[in-house]
Amino acid sequence: MNDEDLDRLVAQSMYSDTDVRSLDLRVGEADLMENVMNSTNPTIERPQPVRPKPTRRRNKLFTGLVVGAAAAVGGGVAFAVVADRLSPEQAQVVEDVGSIGESPCDINSENARLVASTTSDGRTIDYWTVDGANSHADLLFENGAAFGGGGCGPMSRADAYPQIPWANYTLQADPRDGTGLGHFMFLGQAPAGTVAVDIVMNIGTVNVEVTSPDGYFVVLADLPFTAPPPPGESASPLDAPPTMDVLERVDAYAADGSLLGTGGLGG
């Protein structure tokens, strides 16, 4: 492996293990990337399959294990005309993501568009989309830096997300922090006319204000979560079993409270 190959792999370190295994990498590269990421941070980050349930309105931020939480998560930013541009470092990430594997995504940083943003606890997350003729990318950048999360696919956005609303997420959880919480980053899209979405997890519901005219949203949220022990450590017999995180559905609502649509996990 030469320096160019190593640089390309490092540039993709934003991906979760699940993303890495889905990429079209050369022989041995997926194992290398997983080993590097697993050795740097004892956190977990993964999407989960959808388990649809009957539709019902939930107004609380956290339900299930949390009682009495009633506020919505974070305020979105209204986007009338987006004049923002990627930094050179972020643009390079887009170019690198698009050139992965033997069947790369046909995306160009010049087509990057800032579609949603959120700020919480000193963290600002910007959600950018990058679309090509037969490809798409959804990328998150934190605090203006060239990292965050996301990925691309060799298909149009319409083919990738045939059902709206949809949501996806990353998860970080460390049993040693003593909080008993999982730190989630949700992103997605809702149909036109949506003012709020409920992201219904099996461990709680997150209500998100939608201000983007195209229905995109991104939000940070903490939910009750018992993380497994870090690699190399064993769980105590007294410890609660690790939490299974499942995105059950996404409900989109109009200003009058009417349900515009129900979807699930995207991507």
Image (tube, rainbow, N blue to C red):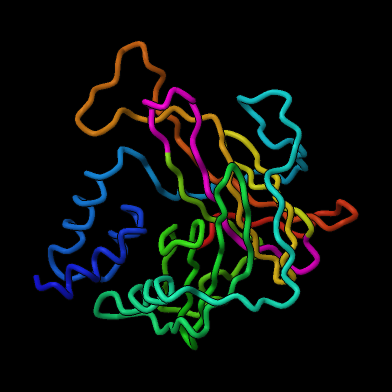
What is the x, y in percent for residue 42? 30, 38
Residue 135 counted in the magenta span: no
Taking 144 as reference, is 155 above or below it? below
Q: Is residue 180 magenta?
A: yes
Residue at the extreme bottom: 133
Is 42 situated above or below 196?
A: above
Magenta stretch bounds: 173-194
Relative depth, front residue between 85 and 114 = 85
Which residue sits at x=64%, y=59%? 217
Residue name at image x 78 percent, y 61 percent: 194
Extreme residue toward the left, this view: 1
| Residue positioned 63% across, 43% down in the render | 200
Q: Position of residue 148 (x, y in %)?
A: 44, 57
Q: Quadrant of the N terminus?
A: bottom left
- Image point (45%, 44%), residue name: 171
All told, the count of numbered labels is 0
Residue 217 located left or right of residue 155: right
Image x and y of residue 36, in percent: 21, 51
Q: For this rendering, which residue is in front, 193 or 146?
A: 146
Give whichever of 168, 125 is nearer the camera: 125
| Residue 233 quadrant | top left
Side of 100 where 74 appears, left or right: right
**Farthest residue, direction top:** 238
Q: In which image quadrant can residue 107 be found?
A: bottom left
Residue closest to the eye, 217 or 120? 120
Name the side, left or right, on which 194 lies relative to 202: right
